[in-house]
Amino acid sequence: MKIVPFAPELQRDWELLECVVVHRDAVNRVRTSTRHRYPDAGGQHGSKVLSYPTIYSENDSAEFRFTRCLMVRSWDEMDLSIREADPEPQFEGRTFRRYNKSALLDLHSEIPTVGLHYRLLFSNEIIDVICEVAPLVILNGAPT
């Protein structure tokens, strides 16, 4: 039997654009982009080199819509003081993860409420979401 990885089309190096939480719903808008190379600086005056604009082009965009959220937590990737002690997490995915077992899920899952733990990993932020239903993901304007 072939093992299919968790949402391979969503495992990209996303940049967080916006995280909106209203009542029990959370929407995370993300993108990937490419930084264009500068012209060669050789033989150029220093003031001209320093004034080159930084130009980015958006490659992909996505919107992760979580409904019936029990908890949404956004935190700095480097802030080790608030990480939960979780010696054996079980998850699938690289930048968009679905946890089968985590300390955070154990804290917020009570019978009869069953929660699903998802995590979005960015270069500087981490967003954890525990919700009652799977999220709707809209990739480049089309639901997946």
Image: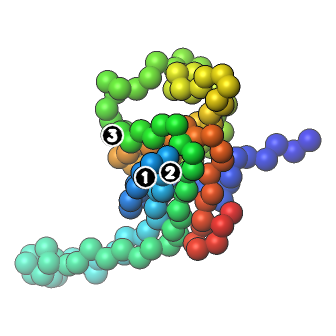
- Tell which circle, 2 or 3, labels the residue nearer the N-terminal end: 2
- Is the C terminus in the top left, top right, bottom left or bottom right quadrant? bottom right
Find out whether the residues at labels 2 and 1 contact each other: C-beta distance under 8 Å. yes
* Image: 53 above or below 14: below
In percent of width and height, residue 53 lies at 22, 78
**Residue pictured at 43% horizontal, 52% vertical:** 22
* Residue 95 seen in the current view: no
Helix, strand or loop under label 3: strand
- For label 3, the residue is 76
Helix, strand or loop under label 2: strand
**Residue pictured at 35% horizontal, 39% vertical:** 75
Of 86 and 29, which appears nearest the observer? 29
Find the distance from the CA under tag 3 to the CA under tag 1: 21 Å
Dot 2 surroundings within 10 Å: few (below 14), some, or many (20 or more)?
A: some
Find the distance from the CA under tag 2 to the CA under tag 1: 5 Å
Q: Label 1 amino acid?
A: Val
**Residue pictured at 48% horizontal, 56% vertical:** 27
Find the distance from the CA under tag 2 to the CA under tag 3: 21 Å
* Residue 85 seen in the current view: yes
- For label 1, the residue is 22
Please give left or right for residue 116 compared with residue 18 in the image: right
Q: Label 3 amino acid?
A: Asp
- For label 2, the residue is 25
Find out whether the residues at labels 3 and 1 contact each other: C-beta distance under 8 Å. no
Dot 3 surroundings within 10 Å: few (below 14), some, or many (20 or more)?
A: few
- Is the N terminus in the top left, top right, bottom left or bottom right quadrant? top right
Residue at the extreme right = 1
